[in-house]
Structures are given as structure tokens and as C-alpha cells.
Amino acid sequence: MTTIKDVAHHAEVSVATVSRVINRNGYVNEDTRKKVEAAVEELNYKPNSVARSLFKKQSKTIGIIVPDITNPYFPELVRGVEDYLIKKGFTTILCNSDEDPEKERLYLDVMKQKYVDGVIIVSNMAEREFIDECDIPMVALDRNVHQEMPAFVIDNRDGGRVATEHLFDVGCKRVAHIKGPDQVINSEERYEGYIEVVNGRDWFQDSFVVSGNFEQKQAAQVTKQLLNKHPEIDGIFAGNDAMAVGVLKAAESLNLKVPEDLAIIGFDGIDLTEMTSPELTTLSQPIYQMSRDAAKALITLIEGKTIKQKENLFPLQLLKRQSTKR
Amino acid sequence: MTTIKDVAHHAEVSVATVSRVINRNGYVNEDTRKKVEAAVEELNYKPNSVARSLFKKQSKTIGIIVPDITNPYFPELVRGVEDYLIKKGFTTILCNSDEDPEKERLYLDVMKQKYVDGVIIVSNMAEREFIDECDIPMVALDRNVHQEMPAFVIDNRDGGRVATEHLFDVGCKRVAHIKGPDQVINSEERYEGYIEVVNGRDWFQDSFVVSGNFEQKQAAQVTKQLLNKHPEIDGIFAGNDAMAVGVLKAAESLNLKVPEDLAIIGFDGIDLTEMTSPELTTLSQPIYQMSRDAAKALITLIEGKTIKQKENLFPLQLLKRQSTKR
DNA sequence: GTGAAAGCGCTAACAA
DNA sequence: TTGTTAGCGCTTTCAC
């Protein structure tokens, strides 16, 4: 590895001068600049960013903590962040938390030690106190972490409402809900949106809601039980797309026609929803944009500016497809 | 941020002693060790890994370069790597190359500057010369990069053969192939496996092979054309699972029954294949294991040992599902 | 305009 | 067993 010293020798100047030209700051004579640039070129010199980090106390690296990159909702999120940041000269460290506060803590510690410049976090468990003590620029994505942290999210509750209403709009009479995991705030909010719509209807009872854990398989299982108990159900709002697929599978195995016998709507708008048949109606999030904006905000924070707009709500789009066409 | 100096003051010893206890090397008296540990505890001291990196010339960070994390094949790969490495104290930088050698180069440069300890790369474009000059421990995953680099892969050619044969086994008479992108070596090899089986059969001609670019939509399109041209086709081997879904969609829109009129087999074994209906037969790769082993090998390399076994072949598993059940 | 030198936080000789 | 110190590669005062 060639160092700044090598370049200095080669160009017959001091390291200070070399530093000045590569950072384009401070005065440097045109001629010496050219000499230095030539040396840089010739030796194929690349400044060592570790040394730089040590001095500057920043690393041009950010961390992103997601529950699980294997969950199809997250890759696009991560990609949006990475794409934006690489252009700005930042590199992205990926962390899978499995929704485990312990792991989040661990990762955050590691990142701090590495002088990570900022982190983007998808979490709703993170303890306020710990986050604060981290003292690192941070933005929340997909879920609010706490009031003061800029967040890039959609209105889950509204989404839940819209999804449920859509099912009634296409003629459903009895609409059930497969809820996501209880500890994820988003599931809770989507559920509340559903409740807002169905509450007070004479047929509604708690047993129209079952929990599916955001996974296809379990959703299929609980859906079967649900439909056995309440054969009158003719519409299901699944808390996310993966579960919507599970519902579809369940319908199939019970010989129910979708959408004729059972209409289905998912949530998130991942690609998967176009892969099934019938294709799934879903509420689509502008995932790429959200993550891009989150990354942008993080940079702002890193630059020492502040972000007044704490909660940034993005619009959901109702993608009407075959699973609710009737 | 508290530094080693602070701890030293607090414990009334020298920084060298502190360094010794936190690194558990060199002699240190039991009592002073306790004093130091108490100070560390009290000040909540975490060693600054940037300073450490600068001295040690290694960063406890590795990079992983994949074409696109958004492609459902890669998240699991990345997860396997990340899971293993975090346990070993390494942190993972994610890079999306979009199969672009220019980007690969850029990322590799950045990583070198950051003293990344090693990289795992999914690529077949990387220029040998450039890789060599990188002088960084590297292993290849999913595709061979060059002879000397340890690679963790499956036998694509064999897979192509097995997939094609399976279609004939279930009674297909005319089997076509939707090939992946030409520049990806894996597509090429899977194609060769297919050719091995069909070559020489009287009905076979080049027009039984079309290119689908690993994407669902395009695969659906070319499949329609293919089936219009050759309505006699009763089995299709798709170069990956996403394209198999596309084929399924195409079959549907042409009112062909799967598997009765058209049997379909995919490749890779991503979760997606269980989401469709009928569920897709596919050749499943042990993705998680492969990536884990690749990570393990990278660590070995980083530790300065060498890996004799250059090409590490993993077994494919034929998952027989509804799309070929007849 | 340019260079000498201090220092970022840590490790590892080398002395004591 | 412990401390002193040089140095990892870079940036930035502060003199000249």
C-alpha cells in the first residue's frame, strides 16, 4: 500500500502539501499541484481512509439495522439506502436484528466503536434511553422509534382502513383480518385501521381477527381455522403480503374461489403479489423512495444540520388486482 | 468517547497496561487487572476500533458484493454470510454491483482503502488482473471467478441435466428451455446441461431455447411466443425460479393446464416456488450453507492459512412439486 | 505557498 | 510485572 509519504517523496514535497492537493484545501501552487497529481497517478495512490477516520472521527460508513434481510420487504429498503449513500461516498454496513433488542444493542455498540457516521434503523423495540446514549445520528425507517427521531413511514392505520373499506366496496359482507405479530407496532396500527371500519357492525366479533406472524405458512394455517369457524367470511385483509399469499393458499385448499368466494387484500406491495394467481390486491408502499429519503435525511443529520419534520408520511397506493375484482 | 488514556488515568496505570488487559495478552498482575477492569466498567470504555485498525492494518470488516440484493436469491446468501461473521466479530459491508465490472472495481477500491479484511464476491465478470492486484483475501460465491480463488458453488451443468431429465421422466415429449442472461456463466452452464439431454433428439432445434434474463415478466413474454411457435412443447425448464413463475403465468394466460398440458421446473429453490399454485418443482441449492461455508473459508484465508480445495461443490436437491406431478 | 510537527487512539517493542 | 515510547497514515495548526 502506498502512503502519503511515498507520494511526498516522489513529488519532492512534504506530506502536508500532498494532503492539501488531495483534499483541495489550503493554498498550493499550480506547478507543485501538478507534480503531486502526477505522483498520485503514477503510484496509484489511494488515501487510507482508516487513518483519515481516526483523525476526523468519522468513517464515511453508515449502518442499517433491519429485522431480517430475508424478509422480502427489506431488500428494496436496503437497496434504496445503499444506492443513495454510495453516491455520497458512504459505505453501508448491514445488520440483521431479528427484532431482538439485544442484537440491536450489540450492533449499535459495534458501530459506535467503528465511528460509523450514522445509522438507519427499522425497529420499534429500541429503548429510548440506550438510543440516546448512543449519540449517533439516526433516522427511523418503516417504524417510529421515538418522537424526536426523524422517521420515514407510511400511515399504517389509514392503510388498514383503506384496505378494509376496499373489501366492502367490492361487495364483501364479512371481512376478517389476519394480524401481524403483536410486538411489531405496524401490525397493531393496521389492525386498528381494520377495527375502525368493522367496529359496531352487528356481525363483528373478536374471533374475526387472528394472528399470523407475517409469515405465509402460519397465515395459511390460521386462515383455515378461521374459515372453518366462520364460513360466512367473504373477504380477508392480511396484515402483509406474505400472509396474503398464505390466505390464498388456504382458500385454494378449501376449494374457495378467489375473488368470487373470498376476496383478499395484502399490504406492502412487494413483487411477490404479482407472482401469484390470481394476482393480489395490495396497499403498496413507496419503499424505494422512503428509504432514499431516509438516507438523504441521515446525511443531513451527519452534516450537523437538524431536521424539523420529524414524522415523514408517505402515500400508500391501492393496487387493485384480481384477488378483489368482482 | 472515553479513550484508553482515560481508563489508564482512572485506574492509575499506564495505557500499555490497559491495553494488555483488554487484549488479554502480556503479563499483568491480578490486582491491577481488577483495577483496570473496574475502570473499564465504570467508564463504560469501548476500545476504538478505528485506531486499532490503523495499527493492525485490519478492520474486522468484510465486504460482500452481490449483483442485486433485490433479487430474491441473494438475501439468504447475504444473511448466511452475515450470521456467521458477526459471531466471529466481523461486520459486513453490502455492495450491489448490478453485474457491472465498473461498480465492482469501485467497491473493491473503496474496501481496500478501508482495510477491509476480505471480500466475498458473486461475479463472473471480475477481471483476473484487477482482482489479483487487489491483494485482499477473497472467495467466490455462486459463481467461479477464477481458478485460484476458492469458490462455493453448485454444479449448474449437472443441475441443468437433472432438471431436463426430470421433465422427460414425468412423461414430457418436447422440452424447451428459458435461458438466463448470456453474460452470467451460470445460465450458460445450466443451458449446457439442458443441451446435453436434448441434443440429437430428432425434434430438437435451436428455437426450443429462448432467453429470459432471469426475470419473471420477460420470461412470461418469451414463453408465450415460444409456445405459439411450438405448441407441441409440453415441458419447460426455466433457468431460475423467477422465470419459472413467468412461465407459469404465460401458461395460465394461454389456458394451458400445469402440469397436465405443460410441466414446469425452475432452478434455485427460493421460497417463491412454494407461493405459487401449483407449487413449482425446482432444483434447490443449499444457499444458507454455501454462504456460511464461504464465510468460514474467508476467515481461514484472513487468518493467513490457505485453502487447498479451490472449487467446493454443493449438492442440488430436486424438489418435486405440483408443477411436474403427472 | 510550503514544511515541521503534533496528535487522532491504539499496540507492541523495549526498558526498567 | 509495568511504563515509556515510537509509530500506524493522515490532517491541520503554526511558523517560515
Image (cartoon, coloured by chain):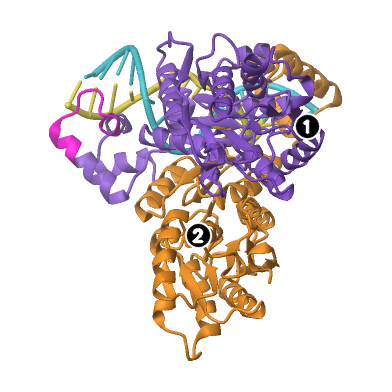
Chain colours: A orange, B purple, C cyan, D yellow
Q: Position of residue B49 (x, y in %)?
A: 44, 35
| Label 2: chain letter | A
Q: Nearer the viewer, residue B17 or B139?
A: B139
Say which residue appears at 54% left-offset and 60% top-offset.
Answer: A248
Crowding at dot 2, Cα within 10 Å, few <14 / some 14-19 / many 20+, comes out as many
Q: Is residue B33 magenta?
A: yes
Vertical side of A33 occupied by B32: above or below: below
Q: Secondary structure of the magenta portion, mostly?
A: helix
Say which residue appears at 63% left-offset and 13% top-offset.
Answer: B133
Q: Specify the quadrant of the image occupied by residue B226.
A: top right
Distance from disc 1 to disc 2, alpha carbons, whole Å, reads: 38 Å
Crowding at dot 1, Cα within 10 Å, few <14 / some 14-19 / many 20+, comes out as some
Query: Does mark 2 fall on the same chain as mark 1?
Result: no
Q: Nearer the viewer, residue D14 or B278?
A: B278
Q: Position of residue A157 (x, y in %)?
A: 56, 75
For disc 1, the marked residue is B230
Q: Is residue B223 left or right of residue A195?
A: right
Query: Can residue A306 be seen in the rendering of this structure?
Result: no
Which quadrant would the C terminus of chain A be assigned to in this image?
bottom right
Res. A243 mark = 2
Vertical side of B217 occupied by A259: above or below: below
Task: Look at the numbered discs 1 and 2 and tell me whether their residues touch, using CB distance below 8 Å.
Answer: no
Q: Is residue A19 magenta?
A: no
Query: SS at mark 1?
Result: loop
Q: Which residues are magenta?
A: B20-34
Q: Is residue B298 left or right of residue A150?
A: left
Q: Say what amino acid the circle numbered 2 marks.
A: Met
